[in-house]
Amino acid sequence: MEKKLNELTITEAARALRARECTVRELFDACVQSAQKQNEELNAYLELFVSNHETLEPDAETLAAIEEAQKLIDAEIESVASGDACGVPAPLLCGIPLAIKDNILIEGRTSSASSKMLENYTATYDATVIKKLKAQHAIFIGRTNMDEFAMGSSTEHSAFGKTKNPYDTTRVPGGSSGGSAAAVASHGALASLGTDTGGSIRQPAAHCGLVGLKPTYGAVSRNGLIALASSLDQCGPLAKSVADAKIIFDALKGNDPLDATSIPKKSPYQKPEAKDAGAAPKKFRIGVPYHLLENGVDEDLLAHFTKTLESFKSAGHEILDVSLPTSSYALAVYYVIQPAEASANLARFDGMRYGLAKRGKSLLDDYVETRTEGFGEETTRRILLGTFVLSSGYIDAYYRKADAARAVLTKEYDEAFKNVDVIAFPTTPSPAFVFGEKSDPVSMYLEDIFTVTANLTGMPALSVPMGMVSREGKELPTGIHFTAPKGAEDLLFTIGAAVTGETL
Amino acid sequence: MQYVEACDTVGNMVNTEEVKKLAALARINVPEEKLEKFAQEFEAILGYVGQLESLEVPEKTPLLPYTNVFREDGKPHEKGKYTEKLAEQFPAREGDYLSVKQIISHD
């Protein structure tokens, strides 16, 4: 085999396991060895699930999962060999090593959201997404670094050190799922889970040359994710291919009674006429909001975008100019609603029931000392900002106005989707930036200018690699971003695969 | 990329006193030497999000449709099934009780 085991995609690894070209343990070992070797430099992982950091022996729980997965693969191979039609095929993710973002609970393991507040917190239950991956017998390699409580676009705001971009270690991997992106891009896992509140899956995917999906709001259960902004958060995959992202999404999606915002089993987004399988049009109508691309996008990045659109055109797809006037306000809307919800969600961390607990003279001191020591600077900044926009006297001008604008924005997108199948623009205006370059908050927030809209409207969005640009002698990846109507992830996979040249 | 210029009519509201007040409301202590920095950053952030003021939204824009979600009452789990697991996370405990400071004071 040309590729090393840890360099395989999920699809390739699933085939290799069934062809007995490797075992589940060999696949795990290849990933964990690569992850450990690079972690000193990259800091992608906060913890690898091994019992010994010299031998990299998987810990007891992981070892049991590896053995169980191998049994299922063996059973499938045997049933195929014996021509047993009743044999149960192992799930696609069976035996596949995945990295998990540190804000997703795995029972019995630390889940810190990269915050000192939860450094000593042990999860008391599995997140629904973890339950679903365990049911598929996927293997967890470790938990990945992130911006504290998922607030940031660079992974510089982690309480446990920054993560570096595998393409250029002087640059950020993006964020907040920067560890999950760096882990996969450096082949320390075949794929990973991230969470996306304003671009936290798609932007690091773009900066690290990966495919990243933010599903429709409610498509994937939020039960067991450490909440940032509950009306915006979604969990999704970062993967090496569109096919891999689809495999993970298919495993994660579905109604969950433990998340009241999860899409009901009878989805309101399912169009009755979309019955015929696939339902993706052969010829896509791709909407491009050219008015948003007039200023601020790097020239060479825009050239890649134009070239990608050209190749769509020559393949017979249609490119249409769409107008989304309220999009210019999306980032402002986002930076009102997100801190508002964050300040409410983070009020639960008070040093009483779990996590960091500082003790002062009075009960109030207990709260204040715990929160002052537990939260990092960016977290504090957003809590205060959220407190401000919700405070009496300002709530109408900020929060209520933003909420109304969010509804207008959603309607604009709904309107646009009457004439186009997907909407495309670059995932970010520029490739990965150098550490410290965006030290003032507003310039950091502008990183999310294109990605936040999908969270505000609840629509699914996919970032796919669209070519490399050169910065200071290093080749850096860029991403093209597609948004689809709610529930239409399959359109995203089809168009995404057209960019990467995959057949799904 | 195009975004509307920040409006300065909503600016100039956040001084160090205001930051202190917000911090007190949020139960966080912002050290003196950081108050000025936070105030300046808030000016910039609010200056940026202040562009919302120039956005016209229709009167009484209907917000997104919200519906209540209920689920059937299920069978309760056996008593105490999760108690130990949860209590293990308590910073201080007495038996199965969470131990905290006196809540009602006399001054």
Image (spheres, coloured by chain):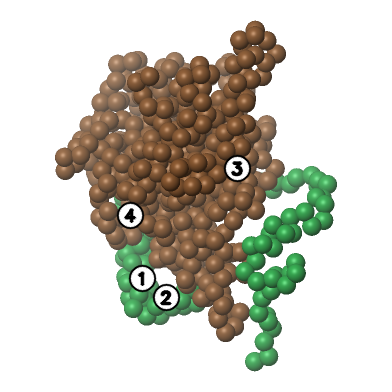
Chain colours: A brown, B green
Q: CA distance from mark 1 to mark 4?
A: 15 Å
Residue located 34% across and 78% down the image: B33
A20 displayed left or right of A287: right
Q: Amino acid at mark 4?
A: Met
Residue located 37% across and 64% down the image: B46
Q: Amino acid at mark 1?
A: Phe
Q: Amino acid at mark 2?
A: Val
Q: Percent from the top left, x then y, of residue A224?
A: 60, 49
Say what secondary structure mark 1 lies in. helix
Say if residue A485 shows up in the picture. Answer: no
A264 displayed left or right of B26: right
User: Do the residues bearing badges 2 and 1 touch, measured as CB atoms within 8 Å?
Assistant: yes
Tell which tag, 3 or 2, sits nearer the viewer. Answer: 3
A134 displayed left or right of B44: right
Q: Percent from the top left, x then y, of residue A494?
A: 45, 23
Q: CA distance from mark 2 to mark 1?
A: 9 Å
Q: Percent from the top left, x then y, of residue A201?
A: 43, 42
The one nearer the camera, A271 or A476, is A476
Tell which tag, 2 or 1, sits nearer the viewer. Answer: 2
Disc 1: CA contacts within 10 A as few (<14), some (14-19) or many (>=20): many
Q: Name above or below for residue A108 compared with residue A209.
A: below
Q: Earlier in the sequence, mark 2 or mark 1?
A: 2
User: Same chain for the residues at labels 1 and 3, yes or no?
Assistant: no
Name the residue carrying label 4: A444
Say if residue A107 shows up in the picture. Answer: yes
Say what secondary structure mark 4 lies in. helix
Name the residue carrying label 2: B30
The one nearer the camera, A175 or A419, is A175
Q: CA distance from mark 1 to mark 3?
A: 45 Å
User: Same chain for the residues at labels 3 and 2, yes or no?
Assistant: no
Q: Which mark is residue B38?
A: 1
